[in-house]
Image: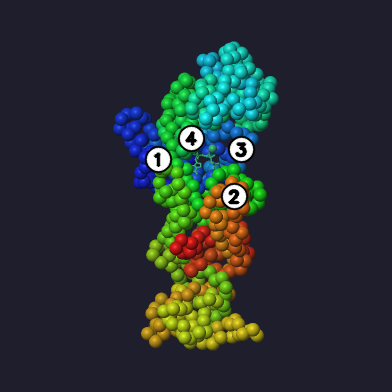
């Protein structure tokens, strides 16, 4: 698979890298390093997954290894092709390339089934007749040891015959299951005869109606790692207690390799929920407009919002990889985005609350001006027409001539200001409506001041942005705030996280005006609108009206 926005090899280091280096130095791992990213296709990926993606792919990159993309598709009723497609495109967009073809746990269903039969033959698995509630009761809890299932001591032959009947669809869902025979008294609940297969009479997006029994995550995961020759199986801390089971399977099955599982802490962000189930709820209840709503912490939402892949990678690097759980301030993600856009974003002018300026001494139809697209980097030039009628922000004009020059660096009646990339002008006169509101300012330009300093007597107060009244393009701006107004929307046991939705998370400015050079702006192209923020062209844009999402404001107004 080729990817033209590939992530550069990261120089960051962490405890996983330490383990890998030790494994290479001691010869524990002789061949290449193989990692994997194993999403379940039951939703869109979110910022937490981005951390896992960056870790798995960049670790492989760093040691000249490979990283597999494996869909962990053992719950067919919750999975679908839309999720598979979105996950693939998110990973590519983040700048990573997976090894070979995409892999699926379902691709190993035959092998996993054979190994289940093998465990039965070894007397290490049995068909259990307890239903889910009964099995839960028999399992005990942290303080109560479990009890053996009444059918735990079935003969190998009986188990083989029953498992075959399960596979053939002769039982109802929930009627029986296949369990490993380990230890119902174990202090580790995961070892209390864990479930290997359950009956699910549902079609699978990859295997169709071939199977009506499906392996559990615990049974499938380590074996899939072994089949693929994964050397370092990296997952989040909640799987730590599953590691003895992961190892039990590998010890008790004739697997071709012995992968090892390592755990790191999940990424949690304040003001954010990162659980696919909850994100799906936001989508299903139409609290947001789909998985890629720019307020969502999904990769596709952040992408649509105008966050860049480089900024997300940088953020994942900044939060680091450790084994201690903690909540990261979402402001850190926002500032990674701001830094990236500040350095790399093209500049453009957009006027939100227009005030008309008429240049009394400009009588040409228009004068084309060239402005650099970026003040420091070479990003080319943009062409803008200067015309007799222009628009500036209302708030950039004042009639109050007592305003100090340092205090108000904008246009004041009787004084000078520079129009960005164009002339120095002087406000001469105001035109008011019946209510006494200024609706137009008559100004004059100082000749010869495009790209040149004026004589000291015409020294401008400052620089303001503007657009040509005739050439500017109408646009819609969508300004986003955090989706939740509470730092920890999950905190309350009595309330739902949806009770903490910020009602003002989306503000739509239906009419604003951008410079005409944005006519050719492409979907997802980003710009810094002077003084307003960083914006990106949304997919809802049409020839009639451009739509921009605000990725982030110019400055952080939240953390003080
Ligand atoms: P969720 O809890 O959001 O539904 P999940 O863990 O069920 O996520 P998977 O599709 O199983 O989602 O995750 C794929 C990989 O991403 C796993 O290895 C998982 O550990 C990792 N991952 C998921 N959430 C996070 C997170 N918040 N931080 C870091 N890694 C994560
Ligand atoms: Mg999961």
Badge 3 density bin: few <14, some 14–19, many ≥20, Cα 10 Å: some
Q: Earlier in the sequence, mark 2 or mark 4?
A: 4
Alpha carbon of mark 1 to alpha carbon of mark 3: how far?
28 Å
Q: Earlier in the sequence, mark 4 or mark 1?
A: 1
Badge 2 density bin: few <14, some 14–19, many ≥20, Cα 10 Å: some
The reply to whether the C-beta atoms of the residues labelled 2 and 4 are less than 8 Å apart is no
Q: Position of residue 135 (x, y in %)?
A: 61, 26
Mark closer to the observer (2, 4): 2
Badge 4 density bin: few <14, some 14–19, many ≥20, Cα 10 Å: some
Q: Position of residue 249 (x, y in %)?
A: 48, 24
> What residue is pinned by disc 2?
497
The reply to whether the C-beta atoms of the residues labelled 4 and 1 are less than 8 Å apart is no
Mark 2, secondary structure of its residue:
helix
The colour scheme used to paint the residues is rainbow
- 523 or 396: nearer the viewer: 396
> What residue is pinned by disc 3?
79
> What residue is pinned by disc 4?
239
Alpha carbon of mark 1 to alpha carbon of mark 2: how far?
35 Å
Mark closer to the observer (3, 2): 2
Q: Quadrant of the C terminus?
A: bottom left
Q: Earlier in the sequence, mark 1 or mark 3?
A: 1
Mark closer to the observer (4, 3): 4
Mark 1, secondary structure of its residue:
helix
Q: Is 256 rendered above or below residue 65?
A: above
Q: Earlier in the sequence, mark 3 or mark 2?
A: 3
Q: Earlier in the sequence, mark 1 or mark 2?
A: 1
> What residue is pinned by disc 1?
59
Mark 3, secondary structure of its residue:
loop
Residue drawn 62% across and 53% down?
A: 499
């Amino acid at each position: 698979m080729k990817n033209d926005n590939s992530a550069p090899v990261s120089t960051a280091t962490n405890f996983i890298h330490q383990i890998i280096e030790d494994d290479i130095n001691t010869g524990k791992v002789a061949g290449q390093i193989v990692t994997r990213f194993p999403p379940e296709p039951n939703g869109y990926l979110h910022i937490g997954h981005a951390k896992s993606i960056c870790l798995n792919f960049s670790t492989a990159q760093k040691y000249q290894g490979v990283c597999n993309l494996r869909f962990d598709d053992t719950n067919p009723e919750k999975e679908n092709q839309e999720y598979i497609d979105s996950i693939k495109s998110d990973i590519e967009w983040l700048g990573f390339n997976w090894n070979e073809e995409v892999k699926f746990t379902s691709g190993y269903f035959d092998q996993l089934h054979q190994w289940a039969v093998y465990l039965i033959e070894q007397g290490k698995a049995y068909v259990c007749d307890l239903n889910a509630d009964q099995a839960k009761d028999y399992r005990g809890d942290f303080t109560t040891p479990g009890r053996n299932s009444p059918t735990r001591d079935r003969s190998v032959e009986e188990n083989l015959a029953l498992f075959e009947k399960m596979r053939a669809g002769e039982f109802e869902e929930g009627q029986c299951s296949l369990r490993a025979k380990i230890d119902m008294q174990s202090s580790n609940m995961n070892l209390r005869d864990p479930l290997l297969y359950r009956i699910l009479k549902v079609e699978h997006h990859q295997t169709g109606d071939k199977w009506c029994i499906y392996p559990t995550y615990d049974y499938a995961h380590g074996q899939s790692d072994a089949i693929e020759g994964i050397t370092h199986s990296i997952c989040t801390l909640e799987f730590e207690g599953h590691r003895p089971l992961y190892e039990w399977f590998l010890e008790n099955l004739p697997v071709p390799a012995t992968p090892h599982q390592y755990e790191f802490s999940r990424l949690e962000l304040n003001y954010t929920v990162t659980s696919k189930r909850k994100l799906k709820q936001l989508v299903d209840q139409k609290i947001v407009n789909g998985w890629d709503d720019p307020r969502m912490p999904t990769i596709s939402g952040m992408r649509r919002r105008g966050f860049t892949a480089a900024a997300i990678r940088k953020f994942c690097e900044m939060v680091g990889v450790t084994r201690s759980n903690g909540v990261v301030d979402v402001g850190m993600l926002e500032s990674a985005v701001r830094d990236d856009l500040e350095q790399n974003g093209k500049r453009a002018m957009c006027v939100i609350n227009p005030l008309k300026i008429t240049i009394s001494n400009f009588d040409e139809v228009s004068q084309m001006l060239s402005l650099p697209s970026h003040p420091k980097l070479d990003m080319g030039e943009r062409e803008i027409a200067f015309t007799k009628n222009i628009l500036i922000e209302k708030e950039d004009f004042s009639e109050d001539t007592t305003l100090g020059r340092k205090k108000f660096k904008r246009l004041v009646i009787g004084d000078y200001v520079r129009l960005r990339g164009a002339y120095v002008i002087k406000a001469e006169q105001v035109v008011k409506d019946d209510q006494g509101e200024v609706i137009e300012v008559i100004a004059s330009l100082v000749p010869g001041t495009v790209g040149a300093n004026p004589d000291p007597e015409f020294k401008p107060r400052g620089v303001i942005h503007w657009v040509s009244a005739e050439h500017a393009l109408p646009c819609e701006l969508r300004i986003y705030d955090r989706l939740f107004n509470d730092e920890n929307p999950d905190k309350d046991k009595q309330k739902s996280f949806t009770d903490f939705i910020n009602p003002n998370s989306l503000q739509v400015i239906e009419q604003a005006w951008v410079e005409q050079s944005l006519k050719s702006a492409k979907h997802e192209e980003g710009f810094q609108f002077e003084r307003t923020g960083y914006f990106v062209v949304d997919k809802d844009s049409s020839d009639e009206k451009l739509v921009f999402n605000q990725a982030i404001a110019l400055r952080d107004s939240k953390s003080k």
